[in-house]
């Protein structure tokens, strides 16, 4: 099958042995060898880990034949990925306009958020969405509001609405800033994002709540990125000033430890 052959090609391009890749991924060598030799097929969780490691989409891993790629094909793939990151004509944003033909801020309802990754490109998907108006928002930028579930990003609480500014060029994403990220596998998440200098295809997503562990997401899995602008809540957050400082310190430690472990 194509998956096994693709894994061989990708590993050789990294100039690593099966044992080294298996250790990096946390697999047994025999498990990874079985994937390459088509003795076994990786489950969805392992496919996701492998796609992140090699910085390719799961779709490419399953459907493309990397063995047929020439060096120029790999170079084109790199250029295409750079263009995709910069949003050069590839991200068409659907939305609603008012009677003056001006963009409005759509509020994605909680029930509709689960289907956002399949409907975001369809203008009809947004037609019945509520809208909001905030006078301090620029008329030259595109904004959208998303519901927040859970307690992973205090002081933003469960049930709050976060307003984000559409980020066309993902190379402008800055480490430590908060973003609404729409991905194929995770759906809509609100996190702080940290870039990897040694792994440009990955970002680490970190919660303000230290009880939630950071995790990596490949850029190839992203659909949209919205930069945090403000949030609307119906109750005041119960966070002490001292708590904020402690959480900030621990969050940075989590990111540093994760990067150190990845370099081993």
Image (cartoon, rainbow, N blue to C red):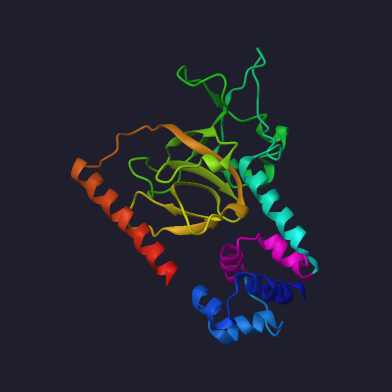
Residue 12 in the image: state x and y as whole percent: 65, 74
Residue 240 quadrant: top left
Rendered position, 201 above or below 260 = above
Q: Residue at x 49, y 37 (%)?
A: 227
Give the side of residue 258 with respect to residue 76, left or right: left
Q: Quadrant of the N terminus?
A: bottom right
Residue 31 in the image: state x and y as whole percent: 59, 83
Give the residue at the far left of this rendering: 242
Q: Quadrant of the C terminus?
A: bottom left
Q: Nearer the viewer, residue 93 or 249?
A: 249
Q: Nearer the viewer, residue 136 or 202?
A: 202
Residue 53 in the image: state x and y as whole percent: 56, 66
Magenta stretch: dominant secondary structure: helix
Does the magenta-highlighted stretch encompass residue 160? no
| Residue 54 appears in the rendering | yes
Q: Which residues are magenta?
A: 45-67
Give the side of residue 70 with respect to residue 189, left or right: right
Q: Residue at x 35, y 48 (%)?
A: 208
Residue 36 in the image: state x and y as whole percent: 68, 80
Give the residue at the far front of this rendering: 71
| Residue 110 appears in the rendering | no
Q: Nearer the viewer, residue 238 or 120?
A: 120
Rendered position, 32 above or below 104 = below
Give the residue at the far top of this rendering: 100
Rendered position, 236 above or below 14 = above
Give the side of residue 141 with respect to residue 9, left or right: left
Q: Residue at x 43, y 42 (%)?
A: 178
Rendered position, 148 above or below 184 = above
Does the magenta-highlighted stretch encompass residue 48? yes
């Amino acid at each position: 099958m194509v998956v096994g052959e693709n894994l061989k090609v990708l590993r050789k391009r990294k100039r690593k042995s099966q044992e080294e890749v298996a250790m990096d991924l946390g697999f047994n060598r025999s498990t990874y060898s079985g994937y390459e030799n088509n003795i076994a097929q990786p489950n969805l969780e392992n496919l996701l880990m492998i796609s992140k490691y090699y910085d390719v989409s799961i779709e490419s891993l399953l459907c493309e034949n990397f063995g047929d790629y020439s060096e120029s094909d790999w170079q084109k793939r790199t250029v295409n990925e750079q263009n995709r990151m910069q949003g050069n004509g590839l991200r068409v944003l659907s939305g609603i306009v008012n009677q003056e033909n001006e963009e409005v801020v759509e509020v994605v309802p909680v029930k509709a958020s689960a289907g956002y990754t399949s409907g975001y490109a369809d203008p009809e998907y947004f037609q019945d969405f509520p809208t909001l108006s905030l006078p301090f928002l620029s008329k030259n930028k595109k904004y959208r509001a998303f519901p927040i579930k859970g307690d992973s990003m205090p002081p933003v609480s469960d049930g709050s609405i976060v307003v984000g500014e559409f980020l066309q060029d993902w190379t402008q994403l800055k480490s430590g800033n908060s973003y609404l990220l729409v991905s194929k596998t995770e759906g809509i998440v609100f996190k702080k994002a940290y870039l990897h200098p040694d792994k440009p295809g990955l970002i680490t997503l970190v919660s303000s709540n230290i009880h939630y562990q950071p995790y990596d997401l490949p850029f190839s899995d992203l659909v949209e990125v919205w930069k945090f602008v403000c949030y609307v809540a119906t109750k005041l957050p119960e966070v002490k000033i001292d708590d904020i400082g402690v959480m900030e310190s621990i969050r940075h430690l989590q990111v540093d430890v994760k990067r150190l472990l990845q370099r081993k």
